[in-house]
Image: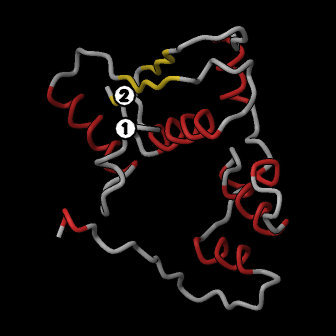
Amino acid sequence: MVNEPFDNNDITNLPGFGVPEMVEWFKLARQADPLPKLFINDYAILAGGGGTTAHRDFYRRIIKDLLTGGAPLDGMGMQGHFGLTVTAPDEMLIQHLTGTPAPLRELVPDLPAHVEAAIMRALARARADRFNTIASFVSALRANVGMSAQKPSIARPPPSEGTR
């Protein structure tokens, strides 16, 4: 089981770790013992009356990425610390399977429209609706800002004192 990946991400935030490694963890667990059911679990998925949150969107995205990567995922857990408003589990599953992510500009009002459009296209459910290459995605992100579609560079923060 991968538990609470939204907050418990010490390992997956290290360079070279992420969803592909989690896919491998699930595959290795299944290979080691094919009988146990393999789950991912997180909290705050049903709480909040169904309003979209970064936490819920992250959970949907990581489940999609695990399944797309071929992880033998048997189920998903949704633990909760419930308040007065709760989204029914069947409604949450329907949202996950058929819903569209919230418009990014609701979360980041000053996000340029072309950046939002490119990201939403990259998140499209149907493969045919997504970009064919990372270069075309980068080009769409850089549109209207006078940047070429050259290979993007990834800036990483310097290591902290304790990890040198």
Quadrant including the C terminus: bottom left
Question: Residue at 47% of width from left, 26% of height from top?
Answer: 42
Q: Is residue 4 left or right of residue 144?
A: left
Q: Is residue 78 left or right of residue 132?
A: left
Question: Residue at 43% of width from left, 45% of height from top?
Answer: 69
Which residue does the numbered mark 2 point to in the structure image?
3
Question: Residue at 44% of width from left, 20% of height from top?
Answer: 75
Q: Is residue 112 left or right of residue 90?
A: right
Which residue does the numbered mark 1 point to in the structure image?
8
Give the x, y percent position of residue 129: 74, 55
Q: Are marks 1 and 2 in contact (CB under 8 Å)?
A: yes
Residue closer to the observer: 126 or 10 = 10
Q: For the residues carrying marks 1 and 2, which lies nearer the camera in this image?
A: 1
Q: What residue type is labelled 1?
A: Asn
Give the x, y percent position of residue 162: 19, 62
Indicate the quadrant where residue 88 lies. top right
State the SS at label 2. strand
Q: What residue type is labelled 2?
A: Asn
Give the x, y percent position of residue 151: 53, 85
Q: How is the image coloured?
A: secondary structure
For the residues labelled 1 and 2, the Cα–Cα distance comes to: 8 Å
* Mark 1 nearby-residue class (10 Å; few <14, some 14–19, many ≥20): few
Disc number at residue 110? none
Q: Is residue 46 left or right of residue 62?
A: right
Indicate the quadrant where residue 51 lies. top right
State the SS at label 1. loop
Residue closer to the observer: 51 or 37 = 51
* Mark 2 nearby-residue class (10 Å; few <14, some 14–19, many ≥20): some
Quadrant including the N terminus: top left
Give the x, y percent position of residue 84: 71, 8
